[in-house]
Amino acid sequence: MKRDVLQEKILTILTDDFEFEQPELSDNLRDDHGFDSIDAIELLGKIELLLDFTLTREEKEKAMGIRTINDILDYIETIASSRDT
């Protein structure tokens, strides 16, 4: 999936499901939008649906470093490309 398509899908999820208002790619999820650990777990579930596969425990642990929307996009691209090989 190309980054621009991925970006559109993630921004839609964040605005529709998490009620973000006008999210920017550099926004800090916690500081700018009040994102917490429960939200992070829910977002990982939505990422699994988007990618159409279940994330491994290791892949989920790597998500702990996500701070911005750009980080989400980088994370998904890394996970998806590792599955393609």
Image: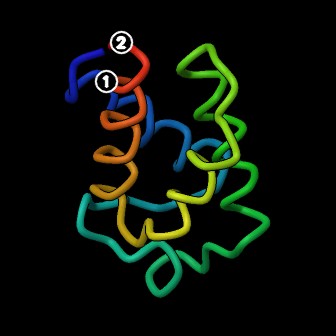
Residue with the mark numbered 1: 81
Specify whether 55 is left or right of 28.
right
> Quick one: SS at disc 2?
helix
- Three-letter amino acid code at disc 2? Asp
**Marks 2 and 1, how far apart in space?**
5 Å
Circle 2 Cα neighbour tier, 10 Å, few/some/many (<14 / 14–19 / ≥20): few
**Relative to 37, does residue 43 appear above or below in the rendering?**
above
Do labels 2 and 1 touch, CB within 8 Å? yes
**Relative to 67, does residue 10 appear above or below in the rendering?**
above
Residue with the mark numbered 2: 84
**Relative to 32, does residue 35 appear above or below in the rendering?**
above
Q: Which sits in the foreground, 38 or 63?
A: 63
Q: Which sits in the foreground, 52 or 43?
A: 52
> Which image quarter holds the N terminus?
top left
Residue 11: x %, y % from top left: 41, 42
- Three-letter amino acid code at disc 1? Ser
> Quick one: SS at disc 1?
helix
